[in-house]
Image (spheres, grey):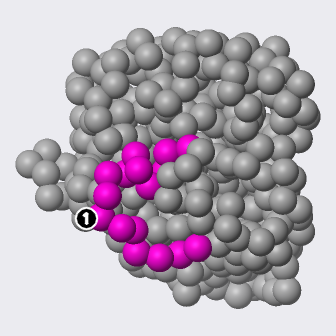
Amino acid sequence: MLVEGAILDVEGPRPAYVLFREGKVVEVGKPGTDSRRGRDHKVRGIVVPAPVNSHTHLGDAVSVREPPRVPVAELVRPPHGYKFRLLSAASAEAKFRALRGAFRRMARDGVAAAVDFREEGVEGVRVLRRAARGTPVRTVILGRPLARPVDPRELSELLQVADGVGLSSALEETEKTRTSVARACRARGKRYGLHASEARRELPDSYLRPRPDLLVHLAKATEDDLLAVRDARVSVAVCPRSNALFGRQPDLAAMERLGLSVLLGTDNAMFHAPSIWRELEFAYVGTRLRQRPASASFLARAALVEPWSWLNEPAAARVSEGMPVPPLVLRLPPEDPAYQVVTRTTEHLIVPVGSRRPGRSPP
Ligand SMILES: [Zn+2]
């Protein structure tokens, strides 16, 4: 298959052609200069790195319903908030089925990886691993130990099956808990993340010490807070739909202007489908309500480029011969690629390029 149009990747947008063989990129160049003109099935479109959904709670998909009008903390506060009551009422079988559904949705969207905050301890991580098996979505699981104070044995067992720990927030966890969790993660080369300044502002010291690998939300952070996060070189996953549902909005323009590493996530699957494209469009339209909006290209980077650095796989964000993760082909006009990709992509516009999508033969 030969795609003529544009590339949008770590280098930004540019006119290009991309030649695929068996789902892999074998040649990239300027439009009209490909070596095998006329011999391949031709598609007009935009080639992008595969997107990453950088913050999910996929386990929540077991109970999709309109949230009651109560403060977000009451909804998601462990261990007895609304969400945790629903989770504990659901059967293991129902959770597994819901997780499989969430993975099917992400696979249709071409999502190559998801970073999930998985509650429910060791068993929660195990069921997510089982559900992810056989899907094309690489799953980075940040589990959560149940016992407080933290039981070193439970934490050690958790880190054997998880890729790290994702805590609720510094408001809900003591410094001692955060420190022991961060230390254990560091010792095993695993990741530590937490939510921060979601419903109200928290002081950067509380969430930056010990230093996490990932912060989620920062919807209530001031510019000084954002500067502290940038200087600590901590990536931020933003979830604009989740924030909007509770009347908040992250200041994406400030994050762009100050140079933060921003990733995009869809948050609680209980309230939003894990669709990275819907999240992108909402993020873009939402930021345009502000006097100073963030740019389409900044948001495209948050879904397509920045997460690959966070995953230590920057080569996946560059459309080139032999790239480690196959890119996506989007059947979109190649003019102004970032705007097209951010506002118009749906699963129906994704052209299958081969092996990553089971059940379809490569063109
Ligand atoms: Zn979250």
The response on whether ligand 1 sits within 8 Å of label 1 is: no
Query: In this rendering, does residue 125 appear at all?
Result: yes
133 vs 151, left or right, is: right
328 vs 219, left or right, is: right
Q: Quadrant of the N terminus?
A: bottom right
User: Measured from the top left, where is residue 318 in percent x and y?
Assistant: 63, 47
Closer to us: 284 or 87: 87
Residue depicted at x 69% and y 55%: 113
Which residue has dot 1 on it? 285
Main structural element of the magenta stretch: helix, strand or loop?
loop
User: Measured from the top left, where is residue 161 in percent x and y?
Assistant: 88, 41
Tag 1: residue type?
Val
Q: Quadrant of the C terminus?
A: bottom right
Closer to us: 100 or 145: 145
- The boundaries of the magenta stretch are 63-78
Residue depicted at x 59% and y 65%: 86
Vertical placement of residue 254 versus 229, above or below: below
User: Measured from the top left, where is residue 267 in percent x and y?
Assistant: 51, 56
Vertical placement of residue 242 versus 43, above or below: above
- The local secondary structure at tag 1 comes to helix
User: Measured from the top left, where is residue 287 in percent x and y?
Assistant: 23, 54
Q: Quadrant of residue 211?
A: top right
Most distant residue in the left direction = 291
Vertical placement of residue 282 versus 129, above or below: below
Closer to us: 159 or 6: 159
